[in-house]
């Protein structure tokens, strides 16, 4: 029995082999394809396994549940967005405007595939503690995308990181309200531009 309060550290998972990574990519592509077609309900584990040509038991070893799979799908989609933004960085001058442009580009990518967006956002909303590592990865990717758009010359201050978290929460909330039909694209744009002003407020250069 443990008598101290130090949390136990889980051993890191070994890196995937090339073959395993290819299998994982097939699974994620199948998940995204099914979600594009019919949203959250269309992503059924048995059909994902059949579409990606893997055994159902193998699928569950990679992703223990549909929620794990769809959160990983969002991680994959964000990674693709990040790579696209590296190739075509935002063109606005100020940091706040660059972040707003970046997030609206990401939002419009979601807008073009509303069923996929709805499936991924619902998975994030339903995620419990067992999905925390995957959710944390999605959050870190979003943070990285925002920080890259800011174009900082030095490490972000605690105040800047706090602003980034608020921006991230607002972007996620804007996705939910738009997907539920409670906000227009125009309103989302206003909300994003408004919250991005926190970047100027927390700029240590004043």
Image (cartoon, rainbow, N blue to C red):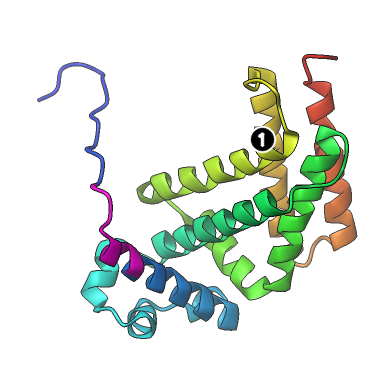
Name the element at disc 1: helix
Coordinates of residue 152 in the picture (x, y in percent): 71, 27
What residue is shown at x 82% (from left), y 35% (from top)? 96
Q: Is residue 154 left or right of residue 46?
A: right
Q: Residue 134: image x %, image y %?
A: 43, 50
Pick the front one: 3 or 188: 188
Q: Which residues, given as a range, are shown in magenta?
A: 14-22
Would you identify the image quadrant in which residue 182 lies? bottom right
Quick check: 2 above or below 64?
above
Residue 35: image quadrant is bottom right
Instruction: Answer above or below: position of 200 versus 102.
Output: above
Indicate whether residue 177 is drawn in magenta. Answer: no
Q: Is residue 64 visible?
A: no
Which residue corresponds to the image point at 41% horizontal and 64% vertical from the top-left? 69
Which quadrant: the N terminus?
top left
Q: Tell me, yes or no, whether the highlighted magenta stretch contains residue 15.
A: yes
Left or right relative to 13: residue 157: right
Q: Residue at x 27, y 67 (%)?
A: 19
Residue at (84, 46) in percent of width and height: 91
x and y, in percent, of residue 100 in the image? 81, 45
Q: Which residue is identified by label 1? A: 147
Q: Is residue 56 above or below residue 124?
A: below
Number of other residues with Cα within 10 Å of mark 1, as a class: few under 14, some 14 to 19, many 20 or more? some
């Amino acid at each position: 029995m443990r008598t101290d309060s130090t949390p136990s550290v889980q051993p890191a998972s070994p890196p995937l082999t090339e073959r395993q990574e290819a299998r994982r990519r097939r699974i994620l592509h199948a998940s995204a394809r099914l979600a594009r077609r019919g949203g959250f309900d269309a992503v059924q584990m048995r059909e994902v396994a059949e579409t990606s040509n893997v055994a159902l038991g193998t699928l569950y070893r990679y992703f223990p549940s549909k929620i794990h799979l769809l959160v990983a799908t969002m991680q994959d989609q964000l990674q693709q967005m990040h790579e696209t933004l590296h190739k075509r960085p935002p063109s606005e001058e100020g940091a706040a405007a660059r972040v707003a442009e970046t997030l609206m580009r990401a939002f419009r990518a979601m807008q073009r595939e509303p069923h996929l967006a709805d499936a991924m956002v619902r998975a994030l909303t339903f995620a419990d503690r067992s999905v925390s590592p995957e959710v944390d990865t999605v959050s870190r990717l979003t943070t990285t995308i925002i920080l890259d758009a800011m174009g900082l010359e030095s490490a972000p201050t605690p105040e800047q990181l706090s602003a980034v978290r608020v921006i991230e929460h607002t972007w996620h909330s804007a996705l939910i309200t738009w997907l539920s039909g409670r906000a227009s694209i125009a309103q989302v744009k206003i909300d994003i531009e408004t919250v991005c002003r926190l970047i100027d407020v927390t700029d240590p250069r004043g």
